[in-house]
Amino acid sequence: MSKHPGGSAESIAAHIQKLIVDDNLTAAQAVAIAAPAPPLPTSTRRPGRVDTIEISGVRGFGPPQTLRLSTGLTILHAANGVGKTSFCDALELVTLGATSTSAQHPDASAETRDSVIIPHRNQAGAIPFPPRVLVRWGVVDATGSSWTGTFGRPADDPPPIAVLPRRRLRDVIGAKQTERLERLGTSLGLSEAVATWQQAAKLVRGLAAIPEAPNQDVAALARAVQDAPTPWHHRERAAVSAAVRAAARDRVSAAPERPDRVPPRVSAPVPLAALHDARTALDHLESSGDDVDSPDGQELPVALIEALDGAVEHSPVGGVCPLCDDGRLTAERVSELREMIMRAQARVERESRRGDLAEALLRLVAESEPWIPPAHSAHQAPDGPEREWGDTLEALQRLVERRRATVATIRLDDTVDLRTILGQLSALDTDIATHARRLSEARDAALERAARARERSEIRASEVDGLLAAAVDHVIAVARADALRGQLAEAATELGAHARRVVDDRIAGLAGPINAWLRVLRPAGTPEITVECTRTSGRPGIRFKIADSSPDGQPRPDALGRFSDSQLDMLGLAVQMARLDREMPGSALVLDDPTDMLDADTLAQFARGGIPRMLAGGDDAPPRQVVVVTHCRSFVQQLWSVSAEHRTMHTVQDYIEQQVDADDRFAVFSPRTSLGIFTKADSFYRENVERASGLLWFRSAFGNQVRGVLEMCAAELVTVLGVDHEKRFTAQSITLAQKMAELSREFGERVAVVDRCGSRAEHGPGEPDRRLLAGILTHWGSYWLNQSSHADVVLPGMEHIREFHVQIGRLARALSGDERVARDEWATSSRMALALRTCPRCPPS
């Protein structure tokens, strides 16, 4: 079997076919064809640090917007409806070529097609910016992965980003059991192997099918032999040949081809043209007028009509009326009598014509009476063409009887409706002619069959030998297939069991990573789970069970039915994270608003344990870049608190904000840095100073913005000091004034150390920035900006706010990082960080 390691289903089937030909196939050999479990796959995407993400024309994003990522944690805060989903959709497009929106709404896919929902449209409905996503990433040299609106196809070199939208959280656990194996198959390394084994089992079963005979004669001979209980596949070929020849002789003697089975000819008997003439005469008769009535409403006898006609003809006007002895004839009375006589004469004539028509019908009956349908009983058969011919003949005989019964109703009086009888006769004659034609066609077909039978009976001896040889081969082939059927079915069953055993062994190792993530996420009382293989007849599946929750011998309950919705969200996230740890280790991960996936307790667990776990790596998993997209401010604060505790993870934050123009509104990235806040405050000042410099609202608003720059500078200065200071400042609840006073003391000590060092080479370039910081911190002691947002104080003048704004802007620039280095390295590479850095020659503080 080692000749076919890891072979395809076709090669497996070919090898089994060879074993069948050699007549030595066993179930154990069929099982051995299955390759051993494939090794666990390595990552299909090479890791690499993502530097920037540029998006334009995708849903809420209009003009190009660029986000610079941290090498550790990037927090992306945005209100609902501003652009979080647009951001995640853009990353799905560049990595997969399609979003998961349509899959979430399968019954409304026409409304959620990517080509419909993705392009950004302005208020006029136009598309001013074609959809485009560009990701710059790399290990050494930066690579640009670009998606430019080709739906269904990702970028040519997809970036190492895993996107987990909240709509996909339960993708795996909510799927069918077999689909769970398909979705986790990449992680387990089983997708292709299980499909191959399943196809092999199907082909093995198919090999046990009974072969078809070359033609009907061979099939009939083979059936005659196979009905016997003899195991023909173990008999000598000569014995099988003798049995087939004996069956052939019996078949010929039992059912010879007999020409007398051809039925007699049947023709149509009814002269249809005569019926047509009769109907025409009836039409003319009925159009000739009403019957002639006597004066008292009674019909006049023919003799009385003739006498009355003669009397009126010879009675002059003024004479005695022939119908009454005391009346005198007038001109009007003469006209009435003559009209009465004419109607009576017309009635007599119509009766005569009607009688002639009835006599004509009777003659038609007499003309067709000699036709008698042929006898049927001699041609009856249980089935086949002869039975069909006999049934047709019986129907014809019944029609003829109905016609005779109809003709019998014809009388020479006025009580019979001749038109109805003519219609019935015409319909019956048409049906009779149709059945007669069918009988004639059946007879022609029978003649053709008889001719072919005679031709077959004259087959040469060599052809008979060939027919018998084919029948012998078919008998042996059918017997062999029948003998192998049970053995092949057992082999196919074993192939399925082999696939289940491999899946069982492999998914048992998946439960560990899933439970490790559950322990990070779950609050107290959430049980662990096991992952089990389902015992199906076809493709194996996966079930998630609750561990250690049932008595011995009892099946474990399914987690899907026992977990609460919150616990199912935890399980879904744990399964997804365990899958990504296997499939895409070290790649960047984008989490779409986990606050919508997890409850408050689980969210806190995730911030304290899950995020640091991904950022730090471990257990052979390299560190990840993580982007958390959220609308929840408290979760952002939790993440910054964790950042202070784990300074090894470099944290940066941006906002997604909505900008409104005259004809459009679109999402923009706004970095959370002192320089970014200063730039916004500076733009606010320049846009409003000319028209509102003397107004209270402008001074208050501008003062608040400058205060925000100062707060951000204070936070960044704490970061520059290092992790110990950051932990202390984060843990304390102190005001901005207290924080600045503490920073003044801390930086005063740092500056004193640097000044005592006296190394111009090390500290000389940073002296202007140290002096700038010292001046701002010194000025802070008497500055009022921390109260400028309150209405119960007198706000400072605009010139003082502007002066401090310019000074704090210089500090923000000194704290900003270099565009040529990673964004989160500003704490050690910015001008201010270099100015305050101590060197080996510095005296201890």
Image (cartoon, grey):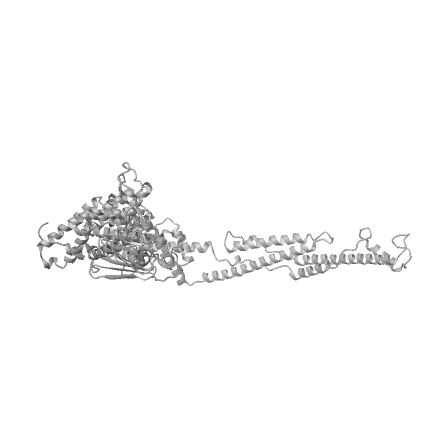
Is 812 situated left or right of 64 in this image?
left
Q: Please provide percent x and percent y for residue 166.
A: 32, 50
Is 512 situated left or right of 472 in this image?
left
Q: Please provide percent x and percent y for residue 659.
A: 33, 56
Q: How many marks?
A: 0
Q: Is residue 289 visible?
A: yes
Q: Please provide percent x and percent y for residue 801.
A: 25, 54
Is 646 situated left or right of 316 in this image?
left
Q: Please provide percent x and percent y for residue 310.
A: 87, 58
Is 127 situated left or right of 629 in this image?
right
Q: Is residue 37 visible?
A: no
Can you say whether 678 is above or below 555 in the image?
Answer: below
Q: Closest to the observer: 441 or 72? A: 72
Q: Residue at x 66, y 62 (%)?
A: 273
Q: Closest to the observer: 209 or 41? A: 41
Q: Quadrant of the N terminus?
A: bottom left
Q: Closest to the observer: 227 or 288? A: 288
Q: Closest to the observer: 29 or 788? A: 788
Where, by quadrant of the figure, is residue 529 drawn?
A: top left
Where, by quadrant of the figure, is residue 768 drawn?
A: bottom left
